[in-house]
Image (cartoon, rainbow, N blue to C red):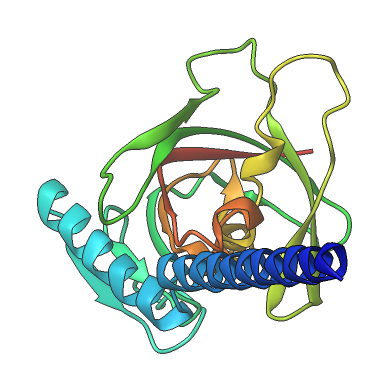
Amino acid sequence: MGYMIKRIRKKYHSMKIKTFLMGLCATSLVALVSCEENTTKSLSELKSEQSDAIEAFRASKGYSFVELEDNRLPSDAKTGVFYRFRNGLYARIDSWGDLSQQATLNKTMVFTQLKGHQFSKGSPQFSLFDNLSNPSIPELEFAYTYFYSSGEVHYRLVENVRPIVDYDDLMCEGIAFPVSLGLGNGAEVSLIIPFELGPSSTYSSGISTYVEKVKYIYK
């Protein structure tokens, strides 16, 4: 009889330990999920922080912006002025290039050389890139095209298959869109690309991209 009582007590004690451990695991899981939720920012929060970051960047550079109502340049567009298009892109035309050589939709291949960096509200400069002054890094190549996929898309990336460093992961609508503005071959542009138009790898983190200079070559 005493042996059976001991077994019952032992089993009861074991059940209490298991219940405690299960409760502890559940509490830990809730805490982990809660922590993840607290560190995951909403789209509105990311956009708000991006606005602050772009404004701080503009002030640090002394740039002025001209707001546009659509995605076209005005007929009297000037070089050296940052225009903000309806899609959110900031673009400054520094050189129109050879206007007698225009990009043709679904035919022209575009090769870009670019220099710049990424930035956010807490980090004004990181992830620098530059294949303008470093010829060992190949040009970023894309086909000039147009389709709609959760927004306008003006490119199809031509991936670099050579076993060297490339900038394929920088390709985005923000880099391709200016070709649709009637730029000539060899045009040079400066860009501030919001994360909504930037590389897919930076979207969820709300990181913006500043392209100090991008040169477009048509082939």
The image quadrant of residue 161 is top right
Q: Identify the residue at image location x=52%, y=44%.
A: 187
For the image, the number of numbered tags is 0
Identify the image quadrant of residue 53: bottom left
**Can you tell which quarter of the image residue 152 is in?**
bottom right
x, y (%) of residue 186? 57, 38
Whether residue 25 sits left or right of residue 218 in the image: it is: left
Q: Residue furthest bottom?
A: 69
Q: Is residue 150 above or below residue 186?
A: below
> Which residue occupies the foreground of this view, 186 or 40?
40
- Residue 48, percent from left and from top: 30, 76
Direction from residue 205 to residue 150 in the image, left or right: right
From the viewer's perspective, tell me whether residue 178 is left or right of residue 138: left
Instruction: Judge left or right: residue 155 versus residue 93.
Output: right
Q: Position of residue 95 (x, y in %)?
A: 42, 45
In this rendering, is residue 134 above or below 41? above
Residue positioned 73% across, 69% down in the render: 9
Rendered residue at 68%/66% (across/down): 13
Quarter holding the N terminus is bottom right
Where residue 22 sits: x, y (%)?
A: 67, 69
Which quadrant, please, contains the C terminus? top right
8 is higher (above) or lower (below) than 95: below
Instruction: Pick whichever, 176 or 43, lies toward us.
Output: 43
The residue furthest front is 1
**Residue occupying image coordinates x 32% and y 55%:** 79
